[in-house]
Amino acid sequence: MSVNDIAHLLNLGRTATYQLVREPHFPKPYTINARCLRWERLEVNAWLLSRREVVSPVRQNRRPTSGRIIVNGVTFVGGKR
C-alpha cells in the first residue's frame, strides 16, 4: 500500500497520514527504492483492528460532570461566566 492508499483507506489527508505513519505503533514500511515506500496491507489492517480495542467509544453525554466548561480560555461555571 502506498501513503495515498492508506490516506484513502482511513479517510485522511496527506499530512495527517504522514503523521500517522511516523507513530511508533504503526507498521513499518518496506523500502522499494530511495523515494518509494510501501506498507503490507495485512499489517495495516491488523493495526486498524487493534485500534478498535485501544480507542474507547465516544461518550454521548454532552453535559460535563464538573459543571465547568472552558471555551477559548474562558471558564463558564453552571452556565455563567
Image (spheres, rainbow, N blue to C red):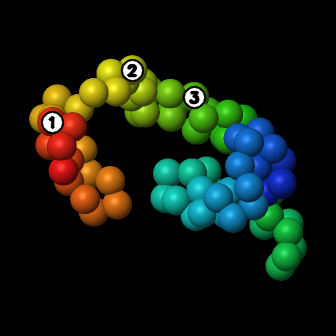
Quick check: 59 above or below 67?
above
Farthest residue, direction top: 60
Q: Residue 78 appears at what percent x and percent y?
A: 15, 36
Mark 2 or mark 1: name the one nearer the start of the chain. Answer: 2
Q: Comparing marks 2 and 1, which lies closer to the viewer?
A: 1
Q: Secondary structure at mark 3?
A: helix
Judging by the rendered image, the residue that carries numbered circle 3 is: 49
Quick check: 53 above or below 36?
above
Task: Identify the residue at image location x=41%, y=33%.
Answer: 54
Residue type of the residue flagged with mark 1: Gly
Judging by the rendered image, the residue that carries numbered circle 1 is: 78
Residue 58 falls in image quadrant: top left
Q: Comparing marks 2 and 3, which lies closer to the viewer?
A: 2
Judging by the rendered image, the residue that carries numbered circle 2 is: 60
Farthest residue, direction front: 80
Residue type of the residue flagged with mark 3: Leu
Mark 1 or mark 3: name the one nearer the start of the chain. Answer: 3
Mark 2 or mark 3: name the one nearer the start of the chain. Answer: 3
Mark 2 packing: few (<14 Cα in 10 Å), some, or many (20+)? few
The Cα atoms of the two marked residues, 1 and 3, are separated by 40 Å
The Cα atoms of the two marked residues, 2 and 3, are separated by 23 Å
Q: Residue 49 appears at what percent x and percent y?
A: 57, 28
Residue type of the residue flagged with mark 2: Gln
Residue 35 falls in image quadrant: bottom right
Task: Identify the residue at image location x=75%, y=61%.
Answer: 14
